[in-house]
Image (cartoon, coloured by chain):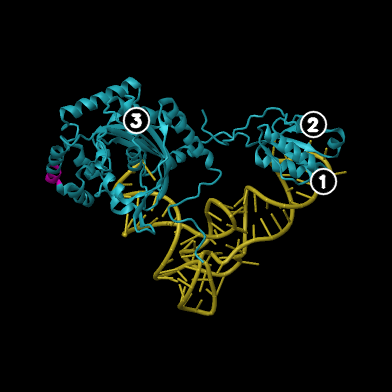
RNA sequence: GUGGGUGUAGCUCAGUUUGGUCAGAGCGCCAGGUUGUGGCCCUGGAGGCCGUGGGUUCAAGUCCCAUUACCCACCCCA
C-alpha cells in the first residue's frame, strides 16, 4: 500500500486558502473586463512538439522539466509547462486572429489555470502551480506593450499588494540580437576567469543568462558588459522608446534593467518582470514580453504578440502575509432545541436558502449552549433559536452573535423566506484597505 | 541533479548535547462547572509503532548506518 499522500510538488489547496485564490481570480476577471480581454481555456495537455518548437529545444523547461509521456495511442503528450504556446495554437487553429484583425483591433485574451514543471520544489515553486496569463495578438505596439503591463499592474494593484517593482528591458530582434550576442560573448570571454563555473558553461549555451547571475563576481562582470540596449537597431530602439513613453503616459512606474533576460526562447524586444521582496529566492511575481514570430514558428501566420504570466501561488503567499479581515462566513445558524422543532427548522432553512441567504443547519436538536458554540465557531452572524416556547408562540428567537441583541421573528415570515439582511463576505479574508 | 535543515498528539513545537520516570507543553477536541444563551475562566478526559529499516547497548525518542518524506538554497523560473 503506497502512502496516501499527494505527489511531491503537487499540493492540495485547502478550503481555508481558497478565498485567496478567489481574490486573485476575481481581480484578473475584473481587470480583464475593464481592459477588454476575453477568457480562453485551452486544454492542459498538448502535443509535446508544440512546446519543443514553441519554447525552444535548448531551454531548461524543454530539456528537463516537462511532464511528457506516451498516451495509449503512442503519441507523445505533455502537461503544459506554460500557457503561451497552447493559446497561440488555439488562436491559429480557430482562426481567432483573422477574425479579430478584420475588426482592426488586436486579439486580447487571458487564461488561468495550472501549469506543470518537474523542478525541485522550494518556496514559491511547485510542480503544479497556477498562472494568470494574458496575451495580445496582432499588434506590433509599442502602445500595446504598455497596455499589457498596465493591465498587469492594475491586477496587482487591485489586490492591494505593495512593494512591487516593475522592470523593463529590450532584447532586440533577429536583426540586432545576433551581433549583440557576439559582442557579449567576446566581452565575457575576455573576463572568463572571473565568472563562476555555471556562467562559464552558459557562455556557450545561453550567454545572455550570465547577465542575471546572482553571484557577486559575475554581477561585477555583468555591470560593465555591453547591454542589449546599446546594440538595438533603429527599429527596436524606436519601439523601446515608444514603450517607455506609453508607460509614462499610462502612469506606470518602472525602471529600465539592461540586465533583465527571459528564459524562454521566443521573446523579442520588450521583456519585463515584476519583482517582490518577501518571496525568498523566487522573487518574480510575474514576467512576460513580446514574442513576435511565435505563431509563424508554429506554422501559422506571422503575427506580432505580447503577453505575461503571473504566479498565482506567489501572489497568494503575499496576500497571506498581509493579514486580513474576517467577514461572517454564514448569515444564519439554525438552532432547534427540541425534536419537535426539527421539521419547521428544516423548512425555514430551505426557505431562507431559496431567498438567497446562507444558512447552516445540521438537523439535530441540541442544547442551546452547544448550538451557540457551533455557531460561534462557524463564524455565523445570526442564530435562529427554535424551542418549546418559540414553537408554542409561532416565532423564532433571532440572536445577533456580535451585538447580543435578540428579537422575535414570526416563523411564518421565515418560512416565506423573509429575513433581515445580513452582510456576509463569502470570502472570509481579504486584504486590509 | 547538488548542498543544508527538519521528521515526537489533529496543529505548532519542547525533549536528542551529557542513553536510564522522556511520553511532554500550548492550541484544538470531548465532558463538567452553568436545566434555554457562545467567546473569557476553572476542573477533568480522550488522543502518540517519537518518519521507516537495521545496528550498538543491560537499556535508544536520545548514539551509529541506511532509507524515505517535507522544507530551504543552488540551478531555473511564475
Q: Which sits in the foreground, A4 or A30?
A: A30
* Up/down of A417 relative to A49, above or below: above
Mark nearer the viewer, 3 or 1 = 3
Lower position in the chain sequence, tag 3 or tag 2: 3
**Residue at the spot x=57%, y=33% of the render?**
A325
The rendered magenta stretch, by its main secondary structure, is classed as helix
Identify the element where label 2 is drawn. helix
The residue pinned by badge 1 equals: A339
Q: Could you say where residue A306 lies in the image, as x and y percent from the top left?
A: 30, 33
Horizontal side of A273 relative to A228 (left or right) equals: right
The answer for which chain carries disc 2 is: A
The boundaries of the magenta stretch are A187-191
Label drawn at residue A99: 3
**Farthest-out residue, top:** A249
Label drawn at residue A412: 2
The answer for which chain carries disc 1 is: A
What whole-number distance in Å separates the C-alpha atoms at marks 3 and 2? Answer: 57 Å
Amino acid at each position: 500500500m503506497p502512502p496516501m499522500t499527494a505527489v511531491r510538488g503537487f499540493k492540495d489547496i485547502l478550503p481555508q486558502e481558497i478565498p485567496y485564490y478567489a481574490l486573485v481570480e476575481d481581480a484578473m476577471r475584473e481587470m480583464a473586463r475593464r481592459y477588454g480581454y476575453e477568457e480562453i481555456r485551452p486544454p492542459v495537455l498538448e502535443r509535446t512538439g508544440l512546446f519543443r518548437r514553441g519554447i525552444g529545444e535548448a531551454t531548461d523547461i524543454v530539456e528537463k522539466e516537462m511532464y511528457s509521456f506516451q498516451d495509449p495511442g503512442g503519441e507523445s503528450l505533455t502537461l503544459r509547462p506554460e500557457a503561451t504556446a497552447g493559446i497561440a495554437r488555439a488562436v491559429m487553429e480557430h482562426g481567432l486572429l483573422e477574425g479579430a484583425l478584420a475588426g482592426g483591433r488586436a486579439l486580447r485574451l487571458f487564461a488561468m489555470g495550472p501549469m506543470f514543471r518537474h523542478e525541485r520544489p522550494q518556496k514559491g515553486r511547485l510542480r503544479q502551480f497556477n498562472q494568470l496569463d494574458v496575451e495580445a495578438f496582432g499588434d506590433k505596439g509599442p502602445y500595446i506593450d504598455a497596455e499589457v503591463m498596465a493591465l498587469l499592474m492594475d491586477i496587482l494593484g487591485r489586490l492591494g499588494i505593495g512593494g512591487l517593482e516593475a522592470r523593463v528591458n529590450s532584447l532586440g530582434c533577429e536583426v540586432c540580437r545576433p551581433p549583440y550576442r557576439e559582442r557579449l560573448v567576446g566581452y565575457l570571454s575576455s573576463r572568463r576567469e572571473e565568472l563562476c563555473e555555471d556562467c562559464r558553461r552558459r557562455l556557450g549555451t545561453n550567454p545572455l543568462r550570465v547577465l542575471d547571475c546572482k553571484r557577486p563576481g559575475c554581477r561585477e562582470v555583468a555591470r560593465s558588459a555591453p547591454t542589449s540596449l546599446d546594440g538595438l537597431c533603429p527599429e527596436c530602439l524606436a519601439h523601446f522608446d515608444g514603450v517607455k513613453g506609453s508607460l509614462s503616459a499610462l502612469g506606470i512606474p518602472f525602471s529600465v534593467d539592461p540586465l533583465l533576460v527571459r528564459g524562454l526562447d521566443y521573446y523579442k524586444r520588450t521583456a519585463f518582470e515584476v519583482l517582490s521582496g518577501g518571496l525568498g529566492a523566487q522573487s518574480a511575481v510575474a514576467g512576460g514580453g513580446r514574442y513576435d514570430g511565435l505563431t509563424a514558428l508554429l506554422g501559422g501566420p506571422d503575427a506580432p504578440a505580447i503577453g505575461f504570466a503571473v504566479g498565482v501561488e506567489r501572489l497568494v503567499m503575499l496576500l497571506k502575509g498581509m493579514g486580513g479581515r474576517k467577514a461572517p462566513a454564514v448569515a444564519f445558524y439554525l438552532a432547534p432545541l427540541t425534536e419537535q422543532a426539527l421539521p419547521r427548522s428544516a423548512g425555514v432553512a430551505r426557505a431562507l436558502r431559496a431567498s438567497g441567504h446562507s444558512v447552516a443547519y445540521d438537523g439535530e436538536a441540541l442544547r442551546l449552549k452547544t448550538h451557540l458554540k457551533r455557531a460561534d465557531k462557524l463564524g455565523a452572524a445570526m442564530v435562529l433559536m427554535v424551542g418549546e416556547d418559540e414553537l408554542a408562540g409561532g416565532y423564532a428567537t433571532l440572536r445577533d452573535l456580535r451585538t447580543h441583541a435578540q428579537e422575535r421573528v414570526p416563523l411564518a415570515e421565515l418560512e416565506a423566506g423573509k429575513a433581515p439582511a445580513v452582510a456576509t463576505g463569502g470570502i472570509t479574508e481579504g486584504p486590509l484597505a
